[in-house]
Amino acid sequence: MEENNLSSPYSTPGEEGVTPESRLRVTSQMKASLLSSMKWLQFLLIICCIGLGLLLLLAIAMIIFSSAFPTIDNELSPAVTLGMGMLYLFIAALYVYPIVKGFHLVEHTRKALRAGTTSDLEASADNFHAIMKFCGILTIIGIALYVIFIVAIILIAIFTAK
């Protein structure tokens, strides 16, 4: 059997100088703050669900009634309204993932704090990580699209100027 140089069989590499007093402990104040935060997060998630529902209704209405809206140009206006409806549907679809992960975060954090289970705390951390990763990726995509649009506008202005 390979010998382990760690002082404790339960410690991880890099913990050599950590004393039992300085190890992470979840205090009652930390639990109270996290539980209170989860109440606010759940409230915000419910508001997001309401907004998502309204966005879906608007998108569906725009798609269904795109030909009934007043037209400036007989061919352009319904297409624009239909396109906006599809864009709203796409935006609504993007909202679903972080909302679902947010509800899972609330559920697992509450279970972890009330029952003291490591598996629920790990699930909570995984859900938080998933939300942050998703938001980070969307931010990178958004910045890239802004740069592309700005470059495209500059190029269009240069080539159409007389």
Image: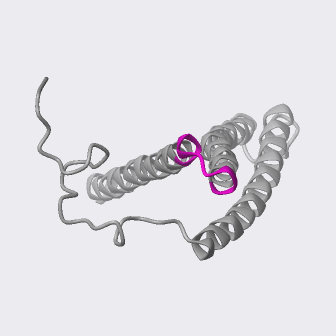
Vertically, is 105 above or below 40? above
Residue 83, how many percent across, how many down?
66, 37
Which of 38 and 50 lies nearest the eye of the viewer? Answer: 38
For the point 32% across and 56% down, the residue is 147
Residue 142, how many percent across, how many down?
43, 52
Left/right of residue 134 with respect to residue 110 in the rendered view: left
Q: In what quadrant of the picture does the C terminus appear?
A: bottom left
Vertically, is 46 above or below 19? above
Q: Main secondary structure of the magenta part?
A: helix
For the point 78% across and 62% down, the residue is 43
Residue 68, how many percent across, how many down?
88, 38
Q: In what quadrant of the picture does the N terminus appear?
A: top left
Left/right of residue 142 with respect to residue 28 in the rendered view: left
Q: For residue 7: magenta?
A: no
For the point 18% across and 55% down, the residue is 14
Q: For residue 119: magenta?
A: yes
Which of 49 and 77 lies nearest the eye of the viewer? Answer: 49
Which span is picked out in magenta? 113-121
Which of 83 and 139 lies nearest the eye of the viewer? Answer: 139
Left/right of residue 149 with respect to residue 55 in the rendered view: left
